[in-house]
């Protein structure tokens, strides 16, 4: 039997469905807009919360550095409340679900993880730092009476260690936050957080090691003798410059006394190396490494420098040397920011602004006779020591001074006590990082003066790691070392012989002769070297398995030389590269975009 329903009935049914479909689409659009608004509002509120937390953190930092963190409870609560709010705003189910949306997701994930890390700092690190500030008043540690308060350091050590461990764990998490494909504003914010958390972690790690080291180094467990090598960057060596003056400091029960200074001339008379040298050392550095105090820091390993210098110091000062510290005029300038200027016997003042020029240049014009220079440097050493020990330095300025000195690779320490040296070896105080399979692309670029005078005051240096690419054999990259002489055109006649050497050691007066050393990663190979033509390069493997390559350059006044070394690092790992350089007079280091090549 035929269907009595008209054919048009199906058309009317389709017509009724179209309005329903439009309503469904509209509902979806409304929901998406609502979700977008929800996310936008919460992101805005989270941003405000994190900015408020930053303001609280600055208040706390100022209080801690000022040595008055006793009334910061309200600020700590405010900080924790703001970071907790940011975590709550970025952790709801809608936010987490939206993290799966292409492009949008990477931004939301980065913001959520950054908020969580910031909250962890507020909860796990900040209270411990404030507690430390309550235990240790930075002003009372160096009261200005020639002593160091060692017991407060011992008491605070466990808390500092806990804070350091927590900060290190947070820094590792922050470093793993992915920002590939994220908006610039998000990527920049995460990068800023990485720098801040990494800096905090490094500072706390240094503080933890310092509280473990300083009490005993200051004589808290028995008398200690510390030898300070004051390096002269105008005659460069690997760790900074030659030891133009050497000071002895005695510490006992926290009381610090000055044992006087010696010039490098007092460290002569070693006919054979003070310690046996390895075949590698004799091949690369010659016996000079162990017979001249000025050459003990030719080696890239400051631990070896410390051993050799201590052996020499024991003979010269007549007492066993427990610790060797190397500093330069830039470190003195940083310290003078904390203590204020010091008066010198000749009626002048040494200040943070004039210390570098006075000690690396002006002194040679003022005292052209070397016999007058040594007493001047001795007087400077004594005056600076007196200023450091008889005045309570500004705590914030002292922290800044030590941080800047370490960051610039100008402060090195070695201890004859094995447990202490193990702590030092993991820090920048040791000079180079330890040789390990996960060291990434460590590269050291070091300079050694061959003029045998003070011409390096006019040496401008620039070091770059660039043009890196991953190959089947590892990471291949380029080390570019640019040296420029800023010496006056008439340097041969306008500068004194003591500065130019007068041609006595084979370099024409006014020229600058320099040995450039590239110290490469484990197992690295030198694929090529050029300065526009082939370079004569001596390339060997050091006892740790690292590449050691050296070449010599001579510059006339105003001349520039660009040295290009191509290196292959077969053990490159997924860790950002590390570049360590000789801290000179004028220098710039850069690392261009560098791929992470897994081994």
Image (spheres, helix red, strand yellow):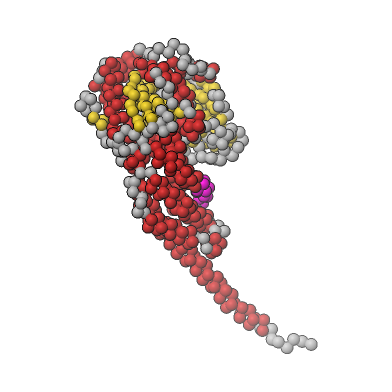
Q: Is residue 3 above or below residue 76?
A: below
- The residue range painted magenta reads 169-181
Residue 258 left/right relative to 285: left
Q: Tell me, yes or no, if residue 469 can be seen here.
A: yes
- Please provide percent x and percent y for residue 79: 41, 56
Q: State the quadrant of the C terminus.
A: top right
Q: What residue is rendered at 58% in x and 34% in y?
A: 437
Q: Is residue 168 above or below residue 307?
A: below
Front position in the image: 97 or 102: 97
Front position in the image: 273 or 590: 273
Q: What residue is rendered at 47% in x and 43% in y?
A: 158
Residue farthest toward the right in the current orientation of the protein:
1
Q: Tell me, yes or no, if residue 456 can be seen here.
A: no
- Please provide percent x and percent y for residue 594: 51, 39
- Please provide percent x and percent y for residue 35: 51, 66
- Please provide percent x and percent y for residue 134: 38, 48
Residue farthest toward the top in the current orientation of the protein:
271
Q: What residue is rendered at 51% in x and 46% in y?
A: 169
Q: How many marks?
A: 0
Report if residue 238 lies within the magenta region: no
Q: State the quadrant of the N terminus.
A: bottom right
Q: What residue is rendered at 69% in x and 83% in y?
A: 7
Front position in the image: 233 or 596: 233
Report if residue 179 lies within the magenta region: yes
Front position in the image: 584 or 137: 137
Q: Is residue 487 above or below residue 441?
A: above
């Amino acid at each position: 039997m035929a269907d009595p329903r008209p054919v048009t009935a199906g058309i009317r049914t389709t017509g009724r469905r179209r309005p329903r479909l439009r309503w469904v689409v509209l509902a979806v659009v409304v929901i998406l807009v609502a979700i977008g608004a929800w996310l936008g509002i919460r992101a805005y509120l989270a941003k405000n919360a994190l900015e408020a937390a930053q303001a609280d953190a600055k208040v706390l930092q100022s209080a801690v550095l000022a040595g008055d963190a006793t009334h910061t409870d309200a600020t700590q609560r405010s900080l924790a409340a703001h970071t907790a709010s940011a975590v709550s705003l970025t952790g709801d189910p809608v936010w987490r679900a939206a993290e799966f949306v292409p492009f949008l997701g990477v931004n939301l994930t980065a913001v959520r993880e950054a908020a969580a890390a910031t909250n962890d700092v507020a909860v796990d690190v900040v209270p411990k730092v404030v507690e430390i500030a309550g235990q240790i008043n930075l002003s009372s540690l160096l009261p200005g009476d020639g002593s160091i308060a060692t017991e407060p350091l011992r008491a605070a050590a466990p808390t500092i260690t806990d804070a350091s461990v927590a900060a290190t764990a947070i820094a590792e998490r922050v470093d793993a936050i992915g920002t590939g494909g994220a908006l610039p504003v998000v990527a920049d914010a995460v990068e800023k957080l990485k720098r801040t958390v990494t800096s905090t972690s490094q500072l706390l790690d240094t503080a933890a090691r310092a509280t473990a080291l300083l009490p005993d180094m200051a004589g808290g467990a028995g008398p200690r003798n510390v030898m300070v090598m004051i390096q002269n960057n105008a005659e460069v060596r690997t760790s900074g410059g030659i030891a133009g003056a050497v000071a002895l400091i005695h510490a006992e029960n926290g009381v610090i006394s000055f044992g006087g200074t010696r010039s490098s001339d007092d460290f002569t008379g070693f006919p054979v190396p003070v310690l046996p040298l390895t075949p590698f050392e004799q091949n690369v550095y010659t016996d000079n490494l162990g017979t001249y105090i000025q050459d003990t820091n030719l080696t890239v390993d400051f631990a070896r420098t410390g051993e050799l210098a201590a052996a020499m110091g024991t003979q010269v000062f007549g007492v066993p040397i427990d610790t060797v510290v190397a500093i330069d005029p830039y470190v003195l300038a940083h310290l003078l920011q904390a203590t204020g200027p010091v008066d010198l016997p000749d009626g002048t003042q040494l200040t943070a602004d004039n210390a570098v020029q006075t000690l690396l240049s002006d002194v040679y014009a003022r005292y052209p006779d070397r016999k007058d220079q040594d007493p001047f440097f001795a007087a400077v050493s004594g005056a600076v020591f007196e200023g450091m020990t008889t005045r309570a330095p500004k705590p914030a300025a002292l922290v800044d001074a030590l941080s800047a000195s370490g960051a610039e690779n100008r402060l090195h320490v070695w201890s004859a006590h094995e447990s202490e040296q193990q702590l030092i070896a993991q820090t920048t105080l040791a000079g180079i990082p330890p040789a390990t399979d996960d060291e990434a692309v460590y590269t050291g670029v070091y300079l050694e003066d061959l003029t045998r005078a003070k011409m390096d005051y006019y040496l401008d240096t620039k070091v770059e790691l660039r043009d890196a690419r991953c190959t089947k054999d590892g990471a291949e990259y380029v080390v570019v070392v640019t040296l420029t002489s800023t010496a006056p055109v008439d340097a041969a006649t306008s500068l004194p012989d003591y500065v130019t050497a007068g041609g006595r050691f084979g370099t024409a007066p006014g020229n600058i002769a320099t040995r450039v050393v590239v110290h490469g990663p484990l197992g690295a190979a030198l694929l090529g070297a050029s300065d526009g033509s082939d370079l004569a390069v001596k390339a060997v493997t050091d006892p740790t398995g690292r590449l050691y390559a050296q070449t010599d350059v001579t510059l006339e006044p105003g001349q520039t030389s660009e040295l290009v070394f191509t290196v292959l690092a077969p053990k490159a790992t997924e860790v950002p590269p590390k570049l360590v350089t000789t801290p000179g007079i004028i220098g710039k280091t850069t690392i261009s975009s560098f791929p992470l090549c897994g081994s």
